[in-house]
Amino acid sequence: METLTTRALALLPRHDTSSFTPAEMAEMLRDPYEKTPKCQSGLRLPMAGPHAKAAVGALCGIVAFFGLLRCLSIVMRTRVMQPVRRSRQYRRLVAFFRYIETSQPRAIGWCRFPTKGVILLIGLFYLFIVVWTFAQTPYYRSRWNVGSPPLAMRTGLFALGCFPFILALGAKVNLIGFVVGCSHEKLQVFHQWLSFLFLFLSLLHTFPFVVQGTREIRPNLDGRNPNHLSQLEWSWHVKHSVYYWSGIAALVPLFWLCFASLTPLRRMAYEFFKWMHILSAILFSAFFYIHCNALLTSWYAEASGRDASSNTDRLACCPRRHYLWATAAVYLTSVLIRFAVMFARNGRHLARGHVEALADDAIRVTVNLPQGSGHAWTAGQHYFVNFIKALPFESHPYTVANAPWRDPSSAATPDRLVLLFRVSPSTGLGPRLLKLADSTTPTTPVLLDGPYGGLAAYDLDYTQHDSVVLIAGGGGISACTSALEELGGRVLRGEPGDRIRRIVLWWMVRDESAKSWVESQLAESTRYLKKVVDLQLRLYVTGGTDTDEEKLSSESPSLVADDEKAEIQEKPPNSRCCSRPPWVVERGRPSLPARLSDLFNSLESASSVGIVSCGPVTLTNDVRNAVAAQQWMIATGRAAEGVAEVQLHTEEFDW
């Protein structure tokens, strides 16, 4: 039988083990801290460690759990489960989970917080990683040559386990989103917070090597260290170990990726941030690939044909799983699917968009889709649009302002796509589009990537609600007009299960002239919708002046003073060809929590409400918290009267 010394000496000829104690010799063979044998190749690592596997297992478990919840929600929407779905106990349970999902802490300055449900999920995973990282001791080996610091190895392996999920969560065609029923923009928060955890683990992976490597001088028994360099200096400058230079090279772009993504820096120059983000991600991935250096099946393929004396059966201690190659395959699959769909829909004939400048720095782009292009979208969905004549190398997300299906008497057809958004007249894409709109040929080829998001991405069916409330801020009216048209079309068609009896639209704008953005579109929708549902349109003008108020008073048939607000009921003329939507106009910024609370209390007992909100962060935050307050009342049984179920879907300008 081989002695302990003989087996230890067979590890690698790079160490002089003559000064090693029996305990150190044993430590080189079996890791007493990780309870696993070391590779016979002399790699100073546990066999594969439970840490990377634990990170992968935990994240896969979370994805599987929410995937099962999605399947359960689909089953609960079937006709068979209708009695259960309408029971008081079920609604209270659903309201409790929706409260956790919806409630959101207020932002502190530029620092935004996700919803409480997201905070809870991220916090639990952070706690899982951090407790396991620091609970095991000791953090360092007895000597440098005996092995790498256990603290460094744990954190490095945890980071390695998180890496494929960070890539997958950042993709537009999102495989995780496909499983859990969530669009890519709502998963960005997990992409960002996992990236910060990766940076934290990477720093904890680095510092133990620095601490142990600088406090221990490499012995000069072989005469190769006459200058008495530390172990770290020797490994870096004399031995030129790949792990040190590649690790620092990976840390630099990783640091940039995380901190340049903070809101103030990202808003300063978004176009610059976007290109640098892509470049930094490529550099980091390349250096990270080199840094792993075929350890723990990260990218090692085959050992056949190698000299066993120089690298003793590396695969004998490592299963043949090529982790980083699998990671690349997961991400590249989503990229290939995305570009394949783009090519299939845009490859033969590019759509052309007619650009029109509107009041209050708004732009309307009417895109005429080629016949048979395959573009199909639903309410609230967005496209990434490349205006080739304006900015050929940039694409920006815009919510579609119309639904594919319209009233049969309408001139609009499914091959017309309308984009409506506000722009900055001085920076970015805005000046170019405004200049194009004023030109003699205000058209441009457009490259459409999508659609993404919307109600369909979350398996939401708002025709199952008695009332639907659409809340928009500024350019967020796009999501509401498309939802209004789609829901209205389904009501008119009399689809089975339709319960909508009331549709309410609240729109907050800076200037009343913004009505012209959607006036013709809403006029046509209201013309046929008001015959079958109770339709209410309310406009809140938040930036009005005295001149505006005088103009409003002179044009409106009635004026009602209400504290600091002026409320005007616009009655459309008798002519159907030139009718306008019946807006109720109010001056001042509304208190959305108070308005929503009044609405909930005014509804019939046991009724349900579906809410769609699209606009700035402050608006969606107010809506979320107002809905969360009602969810809590339902969950605790205090909502004895009024609404019994509330469902919220939000679209935001910032992700």
Image (spheres, grey):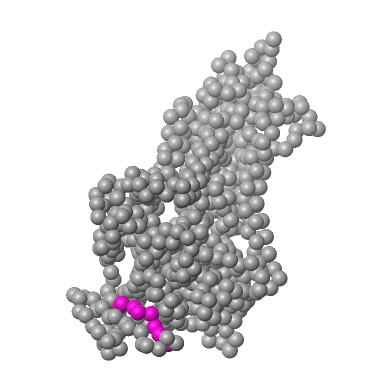
Residue 608 placement (x, y as % from top left):
35, 57
| Residue at (58, 23) in percent of width and height | 36
User: In this view of the protein, which residue sits in the foreground, 195 or 596?
Assistant: 596
Is 280 magenta? The answer is no
| Residue at (39, 75) in percent of width and height | 531
Is 50 situated left or right of 648 in this image? right
User: In this view of the protein, which residue sits in the foreground, 269 or 561?
Assistant: 561
For the magenta stretch, what is the residue range?
Answer: 578-585
Residue 606 visible to an observer of this rendering: yes
Is 580 magenta? The answer is yes
Is 347 situated left or right of 33 in this image? right
| Residue at (26, 52) in percent of width and height | 639
User: In this view of the protein, which residue sits in the foreground, 29 or 331?
Assistant: 331
Residue extending farthest right: 305
Q: Quadrant of residue 447?
A: bottom right
Residue 355 placement (x, y as % from top left):
54, 80
Residue 270 placement (x, y as % from top left):
50, 65
| Residue at (54, 53) in percent of width and height | 170
Residue 537 placement (x, y as % from top left):
35, 74
Q: Quadrant of the N terminus?
A: top right
Q: Quadrant of residue 336?
A: bottom right
Is 333 situated left or right of 135 in this image? right
Is 149 situated left or right of 599 in this image? right
Residue 390 visible to an observer of this rendering: no
